[in-house]
Every structure is written in C-alpha cells, then in structure tokens.
Amino acid sequence: MAEQNTAQGAARAGQRVPTVVADELHIVYRVNGAKTGKGSATAALSRIVGRGKDDAKRGVRKVHAVRGVSFVAYRGEAIGLIGSNGSGKSTLLRAIAGLLPAEKGRVYTDGQPSLLGVNAALMNDLTGERNVILGGLAMGMSREQIKSRYQEIVDFSGINEKGDFITLPMRTYSSGMAARLRFSIAAAKDHDVLMIDEALATGDRKFQKRSEDRIRELRKEAGTVFLVSHNNKSIRDTCDRVLWLERGELRMDGPTEEVLKEYEKFTGK
C-alpha cells in the first residue's frame, strides 16, 4: 500500500512512474525435435533419461525468440508493438505477464500485468453471460463490480446488436464476437498494465473506435497499455510510443510517427 501511495503521489507531482522495466531480456523456447521412437510415452521417457544432458545431444532445438530487449514503460503511456510475423511481439507480452521465464535478464513490473485473452479465460460451453462473470472474476473484479458493469460490458461488445447472443454458448460465436467480448471484459477494469494482442483487428470500424477511446481512458487512469497490431492506423490513432521488434531484437524505440515512418520504409508499405 505504501508503494502504491508513493507511485500515485509521484504521478500527481508530474514525475514519470515506471510500470515495466525490461533489462537485457532474453526468452528462449526449447522444442523437442528428437526422433525417439513411436508414441508419446517413448518420447517422454527419452526426455526424462536425457535430462541434464546437452540440448543438442537430446535433440532439443532452441528458438531464441527475444534477444537482449531493454526498455522502460511509464504510467499513462500507450505503447505499440510492431514487427514482422515471428519477431517476438507476443512472446515479449507473455514474458511481461509472467507467463514465460527469462533465459537471461529480467522483467520488473509495478502492479499486476493483464494480458488480454489470458486473464479473461473464457469457456466455449458456457453462455456469454456466464463468461462475463467468469472473465471478470479472472481479471480480479468483485461480483458487485461485475454486476454493476455487466450491461456496459455487453453493450460495449456489440454482440447483442443482432440478437440475444449473450445468452448463447460461446461456441456459437464467431471468432470476432468472442474477441470483442474478451476485450470488453478486460476494458471494464482499470489496469496497472494492460497488454492487448491484435484485439483491435476484430469487428467493424465502430467497435475499433470504441476500443481506441477506451484505451485512452485507461491511460488517463494512470495505467500503461501495450498494443500489438499489424494495423498501422490503429497504432497511430492509439499509441504515443512504439517499440519495433525484428528477429527478437529491439530495432527502434521512440515516438509513434518516427518509428512507423522507418518501419514503413523497411516493409515498403
């Protein structure tokens, strides 16, 4: 509580308050590529027997997804993450959320990071209504908060505009409808750090505009927002800073327009 009060006091005083610090962060995936015989049990036994041996001898392939990335994010920032497919954007978000261990380096966070699509872990066999409750609880909201914001969440998602879909199982939803409901649940809560992976790519322009407006509101509440998107217009409309990753390395970090101009030269778009 004392740390939180200190951070709030610093924010009121106009000081920049760090929320995420990545210090020479490396993330490495290990993929078992050895041909150890038929059946998963045989492969599992081989991995157990080979535990402690050199990865190459065990047939384990290393994928160095994030390579020495360093940056500091501050309260009130909306930061876009751009880069080619496989450049490490989603991996970096998962590391900030604490879902992937660092091979080397560190990630420090102030407050609770929320990764959209993970915290709001929805279940296909439950109705949209039940998933709003489940997702809200997973995001750390109380039942009273969920109840008071329930209609706002449903209206924001727009899934009831063409029928009473909120009472149907989520398996009947299109991928876009499900993504909009996830975003709506996540956006109903003020976050210390909210990470969004391509959520604004779903739905029509009206929903995208609502989403962009909500991100700006979250920033005003002194939170930090990370947005992964291949849509440069969404990045321009939403973010004041951009991190550009290529092949796991941080190629550029700076004001949105400066970074996007260089990125568009690089991609030819």
Image (cartoon, rainbow, N blue to C red):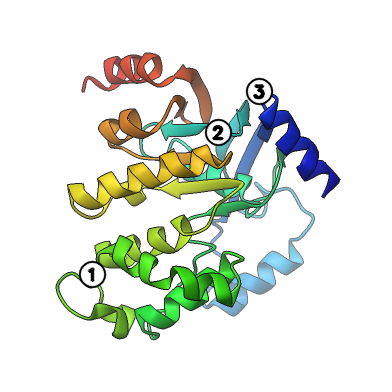
Neighbours of disc 1 within 10 Å: few (<14), some (14-19), many (20+):
few
The amino acid beneath tag 1 is Ser
Say whether disc 1 or disc 2 marks the residue closer to the N-terminus.
Answer: 2
Image vertical order of residue 104 relative to residue 136, above or below: above
Spatial separation of the CA atoms under disc 3 and disc 2: 11 Å
Q: Quickly name the residue at label 3.
A: 14
Say whether disc 3 or disc 2 marks the residue closer to the N-terminus.
Answer: 3
Image vertical order of residue 70 relative to residue 166, above or below: above
- At mark 2, the secondary structure is loop
- Residue in front for this viewpoint, 91 or 174: 174
Spatial separation of the CA atoms under disc 1 and disc 2: 33 Å
Q: Is residue 164 visible?
A: yes
Is the Cβ of the residue at disc 3 closer than 8 Å to that at disc 2? no
Spatial separation of the CA atoms under disc 3 and disc 1: 44 Å
- Residue in front for this viewpoint, 89 or 20: 20
Q: Quickly name the residue at label 1.
A: 174
- At mark 1, the secondary structure is loop
Q: Quickly name the residue at label 2.
A: 76
Q: Residue at x 32, y 28 (%)?
A: 236
Q: Is residue 265 left or right of residue 246?
A: left
Q: Position of residue 156 (x, y in %)?
A: 32, 61
